[in-house]
């Protein structure tokens, strides 16, 4: 889902980059208000976890690969705004150091994986896990379903960004300027990869991590500590 | 408590080469050469930006370790270590800066 440079037009990149600015601003304002300094190392570890989990490519039946992103997990533990920051840092290092995801496409990639995925995942989780006990089956199932939905929404948004390119931008000779595949190709390709494989991997990763954390009494999920507290 | 989390991170780093087993590229992430092979041309706009930034360790590979699967695996682990350290460092610096900007009276009243 890391869109490289050249697949999206500069105007698409710019638009999504501008859309991300208030999101990053709001996220840092939220963290400033709600994040305890002692949570900082743990949140940073969450960013590292996301970075690493994205290195585990899995094969997709159509010959491509995909991977989990960990966005919903971080959103469940620290809240969606904290996940925006953690995912954005991981994606920035991936783009700058490893050329995984474009520099110009950073706004698009963060919009998909650092905004859509954690927010969708977080609210689906909240909805299903309401009043569930930490470590209970319902809480784990909520994490799995939320992760599946979150990553698939992100993949869907990415496929729209890809698929719009040939509709909007073609050279005079009729060839595509950027991503050559339209919505009819991009949506099925991205969705097959994420609905059949990556979504399940994301769900398993979240469930396993929540289970791992449930046996660590020192960690209380924000949704468990205070029902009325607004999410970070 | 933190120790267990660090151990989990270490396990992920050690097993990261498993991510190399999957053949092929993610959809929409092909290099321009691969795309030219399937399409017969490189989209013009793509050609213009393909040299914008090549990364330091592109594709999580450390070039001097070679193309053998052992070299690639070691390179992948090194990339995982370097990447983890950078993500942790940048995230720590950034979130600490954000979190510590709190109004001093506010943090006192929380005690």
Image (cartoon, coloured by chain):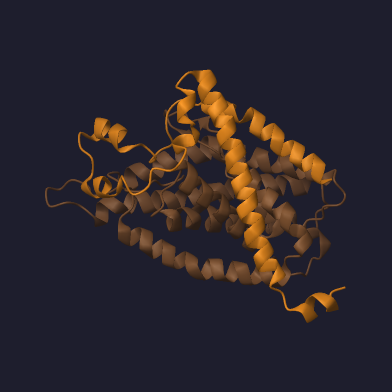
Q: State the residue at coordinates (64%, 59%).
A: B93
Q: Residue pushed farthest front? A: B64
Q: Is residue B67 above or below residue A219?
A: above
The residue sitting at the bottom extreme is B105
Examine the rendered structure and indicate whether residue B63 appears above or below residue A204.
above
- The residue nearer to you, when weighing A180 against A189, is A180
Front-lying residue, A114 or A106: A106
Q: Residue at x 48, y 41 (%)?
A: A98
Indicate the position of residue B77 as horizontal and vertical percent values.
59, 31
- Quarter that holds the C terminus of chain B: bottom right
**Residue at point 44% right, 46% down?**
A101
For residue B108, side relative to residue A123 (left or right): right
Left or right: B49 in relation to A150 = left
Q: Whole-percent x and y of residue A74?
A: 67, 52
A123 vs B29: above or below = below
Q: Chain A rendered in what hue?
A: brown
The answer to whether residue B13 of the structure is visible from this angle is: yes
Q: Give coordinates of residue A46: x percent, y percent.
A: 68, 49
In front of the other: B99 or A172:
B99
Q: Is residue A112 left or right of residue A213?
A: left
Residue B57 is situated, as x and y percent measured from the top left of the image, at 47, 38
Identified at 76% across, 69% down, the residue is A229
* Residue B76 position by quadrant: top right
Does A166 appear above or below B30?
A: below
Q: How many marks?
A: 0
Q: Quadrant of residue B5?
A: top right
The quarter in which the N terminus of chain B is drawn is: top right
Residue A211 in sight here: no
**In the rendered view, does A114 fall on the left or right side of A76?**
left
| Chain identifier, orange in the render | B
């Amino acid at each position: 889902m890391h869109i490289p440079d050249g697949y999206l037009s500069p105007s698409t990149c710019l638009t999504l980059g501008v859309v991300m600015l208030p999101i990053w601003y709001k996220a840092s304002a939220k963290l400033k208000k709600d994040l305890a300094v002692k949570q900082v190392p743990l949140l940073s570890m969450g960013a590292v976890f996301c970075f690493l989990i994205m290195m585990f490519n899995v094969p997709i039946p159509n010959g491509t690969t995909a991977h989990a992103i960990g966005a919903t997990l971080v959103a469940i533990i620290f809240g969606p705004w904290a996940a925006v920051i953690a995912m954005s840092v991981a994606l920035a290092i991936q783009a700058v150091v490893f050329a995984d995801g474009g520099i110009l496409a950073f706004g698009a990639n963060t919009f998909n994986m650092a905004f859509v995925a954690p927010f969708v995942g977080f609210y689906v989780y909240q909805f299903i896990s309401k009043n569930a006990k930490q470590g209970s089956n319902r809480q784990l199932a909520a994490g799995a379903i939320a992760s599946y939905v979150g990553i698939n929404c992100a993949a869907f948004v990415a496929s729209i960004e890809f698929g719009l390119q040939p509709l909007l931008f073609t050279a005079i000779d009729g060839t595509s300027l950027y991503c050559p595949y339209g919505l009819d190709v991009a949506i099925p390709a991205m969705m097959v990869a994420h609905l059949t494989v990556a979504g399940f991997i994301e769900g398993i990763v979240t469930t396993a991590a929540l289970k791992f954390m449930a046996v660590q009494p020192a960690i209380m999920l924000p949704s468990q500590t205070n029902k009325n507290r607004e999410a970070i | 408590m933190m120790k267990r989390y660090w151990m989990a991170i270490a396990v992920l780093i050690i097993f990261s080469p498993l991510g190399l087993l999957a053949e092929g590229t993610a959809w929409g992430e092909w290099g321009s050469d691969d795309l030219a092979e399937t399409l017969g041309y490189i989209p013009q706009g793509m050609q213009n930006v393909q040299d914008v930034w090549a990364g330091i360790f592109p594709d999580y590979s450390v070039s001097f370790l070679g193309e053998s699967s052992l070299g690639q695996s070691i390179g992948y682990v090194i990339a995982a270590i370097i990447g983890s350290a950078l993500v942790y460092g940048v995230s720590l610096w950034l979130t600490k800066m954000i979190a510590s900007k709190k109004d001093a009276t506010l943090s006192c009243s929380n005690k």
